[in-house]
């Protein structure tokens, strides 16, 4: 029976003393091997006995269920005096320091937390939902310590971004390794001080080894990276560049819609439903209806304008074609400039991209559309960074994909009060330290796909 319990519970370096049933749960009395007793939980060295923890009362550790019954391990630990870490409760081989769950149970819960909602994990594992965050934090800390090398070793190309995890402008800053396609760092907050925390964790050699940094157009990121990573080449994310133009295009659409709506109202001075021939200078009813339909068409054309032409539905494509028939329209000219800007990122090489971009900036600067001229000034300031995106064939697409995973994790967890637990879950979910099911062979993590040149194209 004792050998069966050892195998079923996955216990190592442990002696089973007995088992009993208490109130529909199974309690297994255990003790560590003699050579495993009285060890410091921090450094693992054998230490002198200090006293019995909790006045000698036994403690319970939640273990993996046995069939339908919850199972607990029972042991009365002592406290030891470590020369380096002081008085500590002795380590036990079946659990991590500070945990009331066995190592296998925590590995199982962490594996579930990466794939299931917090309520599902709580129901299946029969633990409080707020305990899952602490489990993820301990599992990630052990996996990171077992790596043997810094997760920043070999990092050459990184992407930086921030994403919201809570209402009230609560953000988490993330750093992604483009080559491995995984999250390598995350921290609550945004701004120079937060990004400096990441750069402080890198050694001088690791900072100098960074060759490419992708991000949005935030100047503070550019200035900080340029100062602390002298060999890094800054790359402007194509998605954000095209987004600038999409925002300007939508602003022009609103202006055109307001103008068309005002013209339609001015053309209908008579009360609604009044019959008779139009007064002198008054437009016929059919022309008034045409103006109203034009205003309605502009109002509903947002997605037809900002979406890629190849992704339009039949209705959106028809609406776009109708807008194109309006000769000299500011809205059509702005849309054409948006498509020409997208074409820059489809260039074959940097020289072609530079030629297309210079031509675009010249036409945008003299288009007499204030919103587009403002975008042209932003693009001109970042000309070299935009061309670098085409030359290197890289964007922040991988970072945006991980941001989506982060938002899914936050929704599945129904929010997080402790951001340390959130960061640990994100590193388990999006990093390269994947939790494994107990008793299963370790599976290698799939490597991410390099580059995302088609994101903005």
Image (cartoon, rainbow, N blue to C red):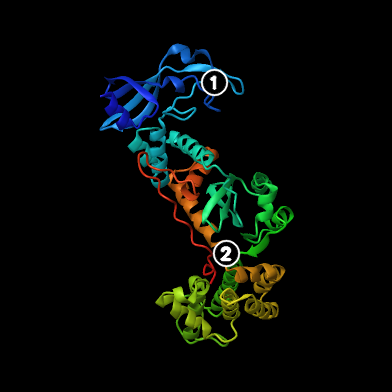
Verify CB contact (< 8 Å) between mark 2 and mark 1.
no
Relative to 348, does residue 63 appear above or below in the rendering? above
**Secondary structure category for the residue under label 2:** loop
Q: Nearer the viewer, mark 2 or mark 1?
A: 1
Above/below status of 177 relative to 261: above
Location of the N terminus by quadrant is: top left
Residue to which mark 2 is pinned:
395
Residue farthest to the right?
A: 227
Q: Which image quarter: residue 392?
A: bottom right
220 lies left or right of 6: right
Residue depicted at 60% across the width and 73% down the height: 252
Q: Position of residue 164 (x, y in %)?
A: 55, 50
Question: Where in the figure is residue 199, as x and y percent of width and height?
Answer: 67, 48
Q: Label 2: how many residues lie within 10 Å, few (<14), some (14-19) or many (20+)? A: many
As helix, strand or loop, the secondary structure at mark 1 comes to strand
Residue 183: x and y in percent read: 53, 51
Residue found farthest to the front:
35
- For residue 12, side relative to residue 175 (left or right): left
Q: Residue at x 63, y 79 (%)?
A: 352
Look at mark 1 in the image and give the residue it sits on. 88
């Amino acid at each position: 029976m004792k050998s069966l319990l050892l195998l079923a519970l996955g216990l190592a370096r442990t002696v089973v003393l007995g088992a009993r049933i208490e109130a529909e749960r199974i309690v297994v009395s255990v003790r560590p091997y003699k050579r495993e007793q009285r060890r410091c939980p921090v450094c693992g060295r054998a230490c002198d006995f200090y006293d019995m923890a909790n006045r000698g009362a036994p403690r319970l550790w939640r273990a993996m269920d046995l069939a339908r019954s919850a199972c607990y391990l029972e042991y009365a630990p002592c406290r030891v005096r470590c020369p380096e870490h002081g008085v500590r409760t002795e380590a036990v081989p079946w659990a991590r320091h500070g945990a009331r769950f066995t190592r296998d149970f925590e590995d199982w819960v962490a594996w579930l937390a990466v794939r299931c909602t917090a309520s599902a994990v709580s129901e299946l594992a029969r633990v409080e939902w707020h305990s899952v965050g602490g489990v993820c934090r301990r599992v990630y800390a052990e996996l990171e310590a077992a790596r043997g090398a810094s997760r920043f070793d070999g990092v050459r190309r990184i992407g930086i971004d921030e994403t919201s995890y809570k209402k009230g402008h609560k953000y988490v800053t993330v750093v992604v390794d483009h080559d491995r396609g995984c999250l390598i760092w995350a921290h609550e907050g945004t701004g120079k001080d937060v990004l400096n925390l990441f750069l402080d964790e890198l050694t001088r050699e690791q900072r100098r080894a960074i060759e490419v940094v992708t991000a949005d157009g935030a100047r503070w990121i550019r200035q900080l990276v340029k100062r602390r990573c002298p060999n890094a080449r800054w790359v402007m994310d194509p998605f954000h560049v095209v987004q600038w133009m999409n925002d300007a295009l939508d602003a022009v659409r609103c202006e055109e819609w307001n103008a068309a709506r005002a013209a339609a109202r001015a053309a209908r001075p008579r009360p609604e439903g009044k019959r008779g021939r139009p007064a002198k200078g008054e437009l016929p009813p059919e022309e008034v209806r045409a103006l109203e339909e034009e205003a309605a068409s502009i109002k509903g054309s947002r997605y037809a304008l900002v979406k890629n032409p190849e992704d339009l539905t039949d209705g959106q494509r028809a609406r776009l074609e109708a807008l194109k028939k309006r000769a000299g329209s500011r809205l059509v000219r702005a849309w054409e400039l948006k498509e020409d800007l997208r074409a820059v990122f489809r260039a074959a090489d940097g020289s072609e991209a530079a030629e297309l971009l210079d031509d675009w900036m010249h036409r945008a600067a003299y288009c007499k559309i204030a919103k587009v001229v403002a975008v042209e000034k932003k693009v001109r300031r970042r000309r070299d960074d935009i061309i670098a995106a085409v030359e290197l064939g890289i964007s922040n697409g991988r970072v945006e994909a991980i941001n989506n995973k982060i938002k899914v994790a936050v929704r599945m967890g129904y929010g997080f009060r402790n951001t340390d637990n959130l960061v640990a879950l994100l590193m388990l979910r999006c990093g390269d330290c994947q939790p494994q099911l107990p008793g299963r062979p370790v599976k290698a993590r799939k490597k991410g796909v390099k580059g995302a040149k088609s994101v903005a194209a």
